[in-house]
Amino acid sequence: MRKNVIEKKQKKKKKKKKEEEMRIIRLVNITNYVSSPRYYYYRHHYNHHCHHHYYYYYYYERKKKRDTINTIKEKKKKKKKETTEVLKLLCKSTQTIKHMIKGALLTRACFSFVTCIKKWWTR
């Protein structure tokens, strides 16, 4: 009986986590500042231990009508992942673009995006 109750509680916790992951607060269209059509959005995470709000920035590329040579190559490499919808973590910070620049992880993927935003912000 007791074991059953513990199992039920664990299942509930798993469900909650999934719901949190699925909750996308806002979709931000920054196509004006970036050459390729990407949509940036952030997810909201709340840390219960130290009561902090985190904003994780992601983007995904819009699906292309025709598969290019690169995507076909990628499909052969990674069959599990969808190549056209690539999710990448951009930064962990608050909403504003200023913070977005500070917190952005400067990988090759988002470097051009960050420089575009910097130019737009400082003009």
Image (cartoon, rainbow, N blue to C red):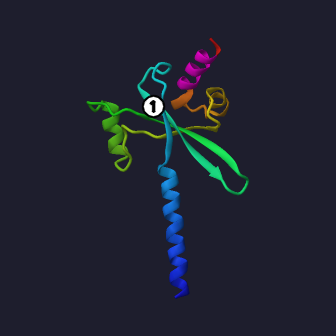
What residue appears at the point 54 percent right and 30 percent down from the top-left corner? 110
Position of the C terminus, as image quadrant, is: top right
Occupied quadrant, residue 13: bottom right
Within the magenta stretch, is there residue 64? Answer: no
Label 1 Cα crowd, 10 Å radius (few <14 / some 14-19 / many 20+): some
Which residue in the rendered view is the most extreme toward the front?
A: 25
What residue appears at the point 50 percent right and 82 percent down from the top-left corner? 4
Q: Residue 115, position in %: x, y?
A: 58, 21
- Identify whether 18 is placed above or below 93: below
What residue appears at the point 54 percent right and 84 percent down from the top-left corner? 3
Which residue in the rendered view is the most extreme toward the top?
A: 123
Which residue in the rendered view is the most extreme toward the left?
A: 66
What residue appears at the point 33 percent right and 38 percent down from the top-left corner? 73
Q: Please name the predominant secondary structure of the magenta segment in the image.
A: helix
Closer-to-camera residue (82/72): 82
- Identify whether 101 is placed above or below 90: above
Closer-to-camera residue (18/111): 18
Q: Residue 8, position in %: x, y?
A: 50, 75
Which residue bears the numbered disc 1?
39
Q: Residue 20, position in %: x, y?
A: 52, 53
The magenta stretch is: 112-121
Residue at disc 1, secondary structure: strand
Within the magenta stretch, is there residue 115? Answer: yes
Give the number of marks. Answer: 1
Occupied quadrant, residue 93: top right
Q: Mark 1 is on which residue type? A: Tyr
Closer-to-camera residue (43/77): 43
